[in-house]
Amino acid sequence: MPSPKLVPLDLTDDERRALEAWTRRRKTAQALALRARIILACAAGAPNQAVAAELGVSRDTVAKWRSRFLKSRLEGLTDEPRPGRPRTVGDEKVEQVVTAALEQAPPGGDTHWSTRSMAKTAGVSQSTVSRIWRSFGLKPHVIQTWKLSTDPQFIDKVRDVVGLYMSPPENALVLCVDEKSQIQALDRTAPCLPMLPTTPARMTHDYVRNGTTSLFAAFDLASGSVIAQHYRKHRHQEFLRFLKLIDDAVPQDLDLHLVLDNYATHKTPEIHKWLLRHPRFHLHFTPTSSSWLNLVERLFAEVTQRCVRRGSHTAVRALEKAMLDYLDRRNRDPKPFVWTADADLILGKVARLFKRISNSGH
């Protein structure tokens, strides 16, 4: 049995402009924007089945909103009133709460709004403020940090380092090198209490400092293995000793490409002279304030999580042994970190962030 013939859906110029505006505006609810796209596609003469396939909805959904529009025009696309207790907070009050959270400073010199201070200012209950903020995804108590590099060679350095990660050179080893300095050997003032059912492990908040050390590490991009050594000081002399350690550990027929940050100890005249005598070493510096670009930082985070943060060490040697033992175990079954973001993706994100903060009005 053939399907019934569809009633033609014609739009006035005003209706078409309104529908197109709903599909483009960022503040339009996604449900309303989808309904507007359905009506625009139907007005173009497409059958329900084709519209459903194009927009990823069911044919019944298309038929429903086509019928609602033919009956009530634009008003038919909005949600109908639902049964239950009527709203006690109008759109104007909701707008006041949202606008104040986004654009106004809290009273009394507070650094950020709380539900109580907003409730007092807006003249609504604290629970109402909480519901409004949850609906709009507002979290005044949460703050995220960011840092833009001021390095004039930022783009070139990003492309250089990411190029090494994505397309490593042949007959060469790419090593991500850095130092994790001032690692404290902390001993808790009381033994840690083990985890129990319904109770997490517990430790005292106070501790005794037993000295510090620095971990020098070179992370092999290809294999995931690590060359590591501890030094009590953090000078160019220690960095030079670590370079010699790398030189002895890696076969002489391989070139070495080292990814480094801009720390001063990496650029002293003594280091430069040694590199001239060892031409197989090639240094690639990350931009300033861009340590996230060095994959060895991910290794340091792993060491901190596994050995340092919840450890209790009575001496620096105990801390050093714990970290080196962990890296030795890791080297028996190494796993590389795989870099997936290309330079264009990274630079595009930085450009979008720069555009946002440049137009923020602050």
Image (spheres, rainbow, N blue to C red):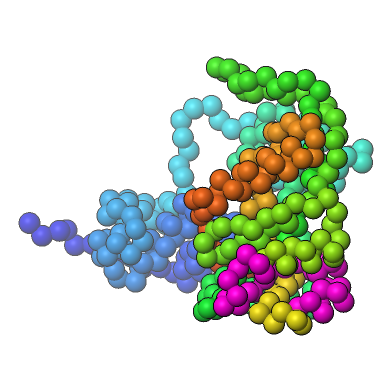
Report the quarter where the N terminus lies.
bottom left
Q: Is residue 265 left or right of residue 163?
A: right
Q: Which residues are magenta?
A: 247-275
193 w.r.t. 99: above or below: above
Counting from the top left corner in percent of width and height, residue 311 is at 70, 33
* Left or right placement of residue 121 versus residue 53 in this view: right
Horizontal arrangement in the rendering, residue 362 relative to residue 102 (left or right): right
Residue 171 on the magenta span: no
* Corner quadrant of residue 277: bottom right
- Residue at the location (62% across, 60% down)? 219
Asked whether residue 39 is in view, the answer is yes
Residue 359 falls in image quadrant: bottom right
Quadrant of residue 351 in the image? Answer: bottom right
Q: Residue at x 53, y 27 (%)?
A: 85
Residue with the most extreme left position: 1
Q: Is residue 52 above or below residue 43?
A: above
Image x and y of residue 360, in percent: 77, 63
User: Looking at the rendering, in which quadrant would you find the C terminus?
Assistant: bottom right
